Image: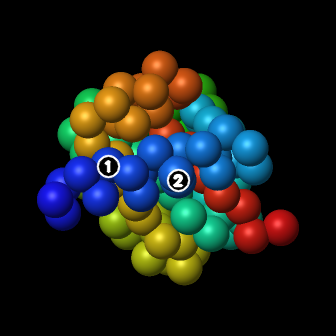
Amino acid sequence: VLEKMERQDEEALLGRLEEKGVFGPQALDLLQEGRVDLLVLPWDPETRVYVGERVALDPGAAGGDSPVEKPLALVIPGLAEAYGTRLEFLHGEPQKRLKERGGMAALLRW
C-alpha cells in the first residue's frame, strides 16, 4: 500500500514538473545559480558530470583547466546542500519518464 501511494505522489510531482518545471541540463545550471527549490532525479542516477569551476554535463561547460569526471550521485548532495535545494528521487515508471526528459528536473524558487 505504501509503495502504491509513493508512486502516486511521484506521478503527481512529475505532473507538476511538466506544468511548471525545467528538465535536463538546464536544471543543473539553475541549481548553481541558487534558483532551484526542488531538484528531482531518478532513484538510480546514471549521469556523470564534470567538476571544474562549475558542475556540468559537458567538460567544456565545467570550466577550469582539467575538469574531473564524477558520478552525479556523488556530487549532487553537496550541491543541493550548498544552495539550500531539496532533493527528490523517482522510482518505477515516473523514473523512466524522467530519464526520457533529460534525467533531471527542477521546480524553481522564482
Which residue is at the far top? 100
Q: Secondary structure at mark 1?
A: helix
Mark on residue 56? none
Residue 79: % across, % down: 46, 65
Which circle marks residue 7 in the picture?
1
Could you tell me the amino acid type at mark 1? Arg
| Snapshot quadrant of residue 75 | bottom left
Q: How far is mark 1 from mark 2, CA to CA?
A: 10 Å
Precedes in sequence: disc 1 or disc 2: 1
Residue 100, horizontal then vertical, whole percent: 47, 20
Q: Residue at position x 38%, y 69% from top?
A: 78
* Left or right: where 37 falls relative to 85: right
Residue visible at 64% across and 51% down in the picture:
16
Q: What's the mark number on residue 13?
A: 2
- Please determine whether, in this image, residue 68 is positioned above or below residue 73: above
| Residue drawn at x 24%, y 51% as measured from the top left | 4
Of 107 and 5, nearer the camera is: 5
Residue extending furthest toward the front: 1
Residue 67 visible somewhere in the drawing: no
Q: Is residue 44 visible?
A: yes
Q: Secondary structure at mark 2?
A: helix
Residue at x-position 49% and y-position 40%:
104
Expressed as whole percent of the image width and height from the top left, the position of residue 57 reads: 50, 31
Location of residue 5 in the rendering, given as x and y in whole percent from the top left corner:
29, 58
From the image, which quarter does the C terminus lie in? bottom right
Q: How busy is the neighbourhood of tag 2: few (under 14 within 10 Å), some, or many (20 plus)?
A: some
Query: Is 37 drawn above or below residue 50 in the view shown?
Result: below
Location of residue 29 with respect to 38 vertically, above or below = above
Q: Where, by quadrant of the figure, is residue 33 drawn?
A: bottom right
Nearest the viewer among 77 and 12 is 12
Give the left or right position of residue 37, taking residue 58 as reference.
right
